[in-house]
């Protein structure tokens, strides 16, 4: 997982506050559904940023996990 920067606790709290818990749950469910679109044989030019679906989902999941982990 690559973070674009190291956020302070207050910054992470602000990011978390952008969505309700129900909306965070919706994002999580959407990421799970998005995994169905993974195609190991997709050409790099057909991928968003040239990154496979599972790698992108894992990166996003990791960032959300770390957000909740750091905020307790």
Image (cartoon, grey):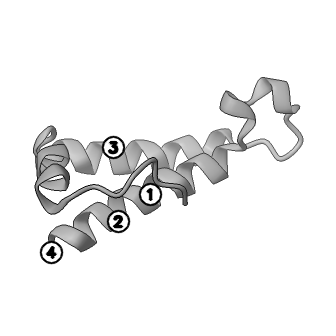
Q: In the shown orientation, is residue 40 left or right of residue 26?
A: right
Q: Residue shown at 27%/61% (left/top)?
A: 67
User: Which is more N-terminal, label 1 or label 3?
Assistant: 3
The percent position of residue 70, horizontal first and vertical second, equals 23, 71
Under circle 4, the secondary element is loop
Residue under numbered circle 1: 61
The percent position of residue 31, horizontal first and vertical second, equals 46, 46
Circle 1 packing at 10 Å, graded few (<14), some (14-19), many (20+), is some
Under circle 1, the secondary element is helix
From the viewer's perspective, is residue 48 above or below residue 36? above
How far apart in space, not on screen, are marks 2 and 3 (Cα)? 12 Å
Residue under numbered circle 4: 72
Residue under numbered circle 2: 65
How far apart in space, not on screen, are marks 3 and 1 (Cα)? 10 Å
How far apart in space, not on screen, are marks 3 and 4 (Cα)? 19 Å
Do the residues bearing badges 4 and 2 touch, measured as CB atoms within 8 Å? Answer: no
Marks 1, 4: nearer the viewer: 4
User: Which is more N-terminal, label 2 or label 4?
Assistant: 2
The residue closer to the viewer here, 34 or 44, is 44
How far apart in space, not on screen, are marks 4 and 2 (Cα)? 11 Å
From the viewer's perspective, is residue 67 above or below residue 40? below
Residue under numbered circle 3: 27
Q: In the shown orientation, is residue 10 left or right of residue 27?
A: left
The residue closer to the viewer here, 31 or 68, is 68
């Amino acid at each position: 997982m690559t973070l674009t920067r190291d956020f302070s606790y207050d910054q992470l709290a602000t990011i978390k506050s952008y969505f309700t818990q129900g909306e965070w749950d919706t994002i999580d469910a959407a990421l799970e559904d998005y995994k169905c679109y993974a195609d190991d044989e997709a050409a790099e030019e057909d991928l968003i940023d040239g990154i496979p679906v599972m790698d992108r989902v894992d990166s996003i999941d990791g960032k959300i996990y770390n957000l909740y982990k750091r905020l307790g």
